[in-house]
Image (tube, helix red, strand yellow):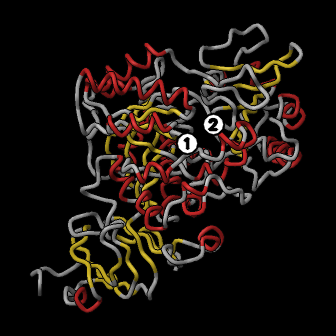
Amino acid sequence: MAFGIEADLVLINGRIWRGREEGICEALAVWQGKVLATGSTADMLSLKGAATEVIDLEDRFATPGLIDNHLHLIATGIAMGFVDATPAAAPTLATLMKGIAERAASTPKGGWVRARGYDQVKLDTGRHPTRDDLDRAAPDHPVLLTRACGHVSIANSRALELAGISEATPVPDGGVIGVTDGKLNGFLAENAQNLVKAVMPPATTEELIDGIERAGRHLLSFGITSCMDAAVGHVAGFSEIQAYEMAKLSGRLPVRVWLTLLGDPGVSIVEDAWRAGLLSGAGDDMLRVGGVKVFLDGSAGGRTAWMTKPYEGEPDNIGVQMLPDETVEAVVRDCHDRGYQMVCHAIGDGAIEQLITAYEKALAANPDPDRRHRIEHCGFSTPEQHARMQAAGILPAPQMAFIHDFGDSYISVLGEARGKPSYPIGTWMRMGLNPSTGSDSPVCSPDPFPNLHAMITRQTGKGTVMDASERLSPEEALQAYTEHGAYSQKAEGVKGRLIPGQWADIAVFDNDLLTVESKTILSGTRCLLTLLAGRVVHDAR
C-alpha cells in the first residue's frame, strides 16, 4: 500500500474541486478525519482496506466545506422559531400582520411575539410597518418586529410600555426612536432597540444550546461546515460561551465555529473572556475564539449606515455614527495590544474611514504584519480606503448575499451611482485582499446559492446588475467561500482546501458549480452530501 495506511474513507468517481490552485481530481482518501491523498479513483482505491468505507460520487461535484464568514448562529437558531417576516413569506403588509396575529392567537396573553425579516422596500406599502399596524394585529401581546438587517425594529404599544419608552424618553447614544406628529410610531433603530430587548425574558442555557444545534444542522444542509458567530454575547452575554462549550461537549455542536466576542462599550464580554484566558486563537478546530466585534454604524437599507454623503431624499441623514472616534480608537488599541484580532462592523464609507484609521493607529503603535484585522461588511468603501487596507493588511469580510437580497434597496436609498458599485469584491480579489463571503444570517438566509450567484453575476434577486466589473469567476467565488474564509480566521493551514493534512470537510452538490448556468445555481442546485472530518453529517441523496 503506497502510504502504508488504510484509508478510513474513499470518495471515488467524482469531480472534486480541491481549491483554486489545486483544481479538479476524481477521488479522495480520508484518514483520521483528514485528507490523506487525492488523485484518480484507481489510486485512491489502492488505499482501501477491509474496513474502508467507499462512497461513489457518481460524477457529482464536490468542494471543500463552505465557510460562512459572518453570521449569528445562536440568533439564527432562535429566530427560526420567530414569525417569518421575510419577503418570500410575507410580501404584503396584510400577510405579515396576519402571521403576527396568528402567532399571537397561539401565544398566552402577555407573552412576547417576535418576527424578523421584513424589508420595507419590498413590502407592497413601500414603508416600515408601524406601532399602530402591530397593535391591530396583536393588541394583547408585546410585539417586536425586526427588519432583515437587525438594525431596525418596530415595537407595538405593549412592548413600548413594558420598556418604559414614551415620547419623553431620551434617545440613547447611537440610537433612533421614531416619532410621527409628536407620537411614538414604534420605530427603533440601533441602540434604541436595546431598551425593549432589556425587558424581554433572557434566553436559558438550554435555549441557547438548542439554537446552536438547530442552526448548525441547517448550515450542514447547505454544505456549510464552518462559520463565524459574529458578536457572541449579543443574545445572552458571557453565558453564550458556556452554551457553546456545553454544546461541544454534549455532541450538539454541528459545525466548526469561530467565536467573535462582543466588544461594544457597556455590553462587552471581552473583560470576562480575557480573565478566562479566551484570547484570539484559544480553543480547537471545532470551537475557537476569534476576534472582537464592535459596531460602528447600522445598515444601508435601513438608512443607518454611516455615510459621508446623505441618503437620497433625506439631505440631513448620513446614517448613525455609533461611537466617537476616540472611543473606537481606544477599544481597538486596547484589544489589539492584548493580542486580539478585530472584526468590527462598518458598512458606510464614514464608518469604514473611522475603522481603518483606528486599525492603522493600533498597528503603527504595536506592529503585527499578520494580525488580519477585518472590516465586517465593508459595503461602501472607496478606492483610497482599499489602498490603505492593502498597505495595512486589513481584510474585507463582505456578505455577498446582500447584493442578491438588498441590492435594489441600496439603489433606492443611495441612487445608482452609489448603490451599484457597493461590495466591490472583484476589486478586492484583484488587489489580493483575500475577500471572503457569508450571509450574516438571520439577516439573509445562509443558503449559499444566491450568494454564489450574486458573486458570479452581480445580479440582485430582481435581476438588476450591480456593476458588472465586480463579477467573479466561478473559481474565484468558490475560493472566497472556502480558502479565503479560512484565511480570514487564520485557519488556512487546516481547512478551506482539500489537500493532504487538511480536515476532510466536504460538500457534494447535484450541479457542477464551475460549469452550470448561473441561473441554475440560483434556482436548481442542492447540497446532497456534507462531510465533517470525513464523517457524513448530512445526506439528501
Nearer the observer, 535 or 384: 384
Quarter of the picture holding the N terminus? bottom left
Q: Are marks 2 and 1 in contact (CB under 8 Å)?
A: yes
Q: Is residue 531 visible?
A: no
Three-letter residue code for mark 2 = Gly
Nearer the observer, 23 or 202: 23
| 74 over 456 or under it: above or below | above
Q: Which residue is mark 1?
A: 75
Q: Is residue 491 visible?
A: yes
Q: Position of residue 287 (x, y in %)?
A: 33, 47
Q: Position of residue 200 (x, y in %)?
A: 64, 27
Nearer the observer, 204 or 6: 6
Q: Where is residue 240, by image quadrant?
A: top left
Q: Position of residue 459 (x, y in %)?
A: 65, 58
Query: What is the crowding at mark 1: few (fewer than 14 residues within 10 Å), some, or many (at least 20)?
Result: many
Tell me which residue sits at (51%, 32%) in the image: 346
